[in-house]
Amino acid sequence: QAQLVESGGGLVQPGGSLRLSCVASGFDFSAGAVRWYREAPGKEREFVARFPITADDPTYADSVKGRFVISRDNAKNTAYLQMDSLKAEDTANYLCNVLVWPNDYWGQGTQVTVSS
């Protein structure tokens, strides 16, 4: 059964850091670009970052550029999101997504709360 499982979320103070992980199983993880999205209460799902299939050329939303770093380890079927200098507005449920055409895989998300 194909699935994505995120972990690493939690409660952190403003200015702190977290590292999210997304572990894939049941499909060819290396064949799809990885994206992180986030959902906050009352807001639409927001794109956060993307790591392509082969090139080391990630893209980021302007709101996280310079603070977040996306990476992947195909040998471990895992994607990461390193989040530094966290702000209250980063509070959200963070979801991992991998599109291996025509299948679009999503995890359940991991909650990140930034609060003092």
Image (cartoon, rainbow, N blue to C red):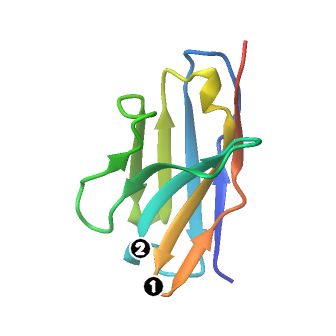
Residue 116's place in the image compared with 27, above or below, is above
- Position of the N terminus, as image quadrant, is bottom right
Q: Quadrant of residue 86?
A: top right
Residue 52 falls in image quadrant: bottom left
- Give the number of the disc on residue 32: 2
Give the side of residue 86 with respect to residue 28, left or right. Answer: right
Q: Are marks 2 and 1 in contact (CB under 8 Å)?
A: yes
Decide which of 15, 72 is in the foreground and name it. 15
* Residue under the image location 45 percent in, 33 percent down: 63
Q: Which mark lies nearer to you, 2 or 1?
A: 1
Residue at 68 percent across and 39 percent down: it is 92
Q: Position of residue 55 (x, y in %)?
A: 23, 62
Q: Secondary structure at mark 2?
A: loop
Sequence-wise, the earlier of marks 2 and 1 is: 2
Helix, strand or loop for disc 1: loop
Residue marked by disc 1:
101
